[in-house]
Image (cartoon, rainbow, N blue to C red):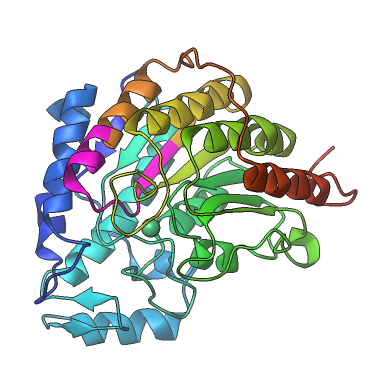
Amino acid sequence: MPPAVVIQEHFKEHCSQYTHPERPERIDAVRAGLARGGITDEMIIANCSAAITSLERIHDPAYIRKTLDEIDGKWGNLDGDTFFSPGTRAAALDAAGGTTALARMVQRGEADWGFAAVRPPGHHATARRACGFCIFNNIALAAADLLAETDAKRVAIFDWDVHHGNGTQDIFYDRPDVLYVSIHQWPHFPGSGLVGETGRGSGTGTTINLPFPAGATDADYRAAMTDVVIPAMERFRPDHILVSAGYDAHREDFLGGMLLSSRMFGEMAARLKQLADGICKGRMTLALEGGYHLEALADSVCETIRGLFDPRIPECPPYPPGAGVRRILDAVRREISLPGNGFPE
Ligand SMILES: [Zn+2]
């Protein structure tokens, strides 16, 4: 079964009047990376726009209406960072709808895995607010849609973007059926994502944050995958793994201070795909978030796709994480091994 991919030329019509890192050329870079990784034209699925009613699964109806009115055919900003242009309305609806349609296809066994190369990104958008270049929360909508419209009972979201996905965390903070796990730089925008933020009410224990210091390396992320991300997902036993695939933790990226190589994104993708093959029939869907250095973005997307096609984990010399990261991993492990944390037995 081949994978399926969402990428639209008109995602480039979402643009700022001014110089902005979240720029249309990112789509060309991702397209090049997808092709180099082995994605062919036949794997790209058709346009799929989100219905307003489906956006209401995660967004406040008043926010949806007000935003679509405000951005329709105009240039402007929803907040200090989040611009819109005459092409934004269609791009935002197709980014949300495309990610959702892709996840449904994968869940139904119509594609082996999915990659949604979308703009605008989504993980900072909350139920009621645009934030950090994000208007509608594409990955959160896909998760909510899977739970409402397919046989999926539990969905896990792993967010490897360098920024904390405050919107995704917020939307699912009290939900026991969505596990949100994020590795991000801290302190950094948007400021949330501390170890103690673990969920609320019946969702207690289903939010896991790994706030790493600037300068974290492949070895640090490898330790995080081994010690926290994979075991937490194994314990949660999701029916689908979603990934907020931002590439701004790359060492070349100018919006982040992390030191990841392009290969590390392939390694994380491979590890998650292996896990998905073991626990949820390989069901895994990724959606683009950040990543602003065009060559690094293309290379990292290429490595991600190669890791998904051939999820053998590369041989890596054992190399311990830095002391700061070790302390965070130990603190997180203490948090998630607490009894009554929302994980099924
Ligand atoms: Zn980011």
Q: Where is residue 172 in the image (x, y as percent from the top left)?
A: 61, 62
- Direction from residue 114 to residue 182 in the image, left or right: right
Q: For this rendering, which residue is in front, 156 or 329?
A: 329
Q: In which quarter of the image is residue 290?
A: bottom left
Residue 108 in sight here: no
Q: For this rendering, which residue is in front, 263 or 178?
A: 263
Residue depicted at x 27% and y 62%: 120
Work out which quarter of the rendered image holds the C terminus and state it: top right
Residue depicted at x 47% and y 46%: 160
Work out which quarter of the rendered image holds the N terminus and state it: top left
Q: Position of residue 37 (x, y in %)?
A: 23, 24
Q: Position of residue 144 (x, y in %)?
A: 52, 56
Residue depicted at x 69% and y 58%: 195
Residue depicted at x 24% and y 40%: 296
Rendered-image quarter of ligand 1: bottom left
Q: In which quarter of the image is residue 12?
A: bottom left
Q: Where is residue 157 in the image (x, y as percent from the top left)?
A: 54, 47
Image position of 12 with respect to 150: above or below: below
Residue 251 in sight here: yes
Image position of 6 with respect to 342: above or below: above
- Direction from residue 323 to residue 125 in the image, left or right: left
Decide whether residue 129 is among the magenta residues. Answer: no
Image position of 252 with respect to 62: above or below: above
The boundaries of the magenta stretch are: 285-299
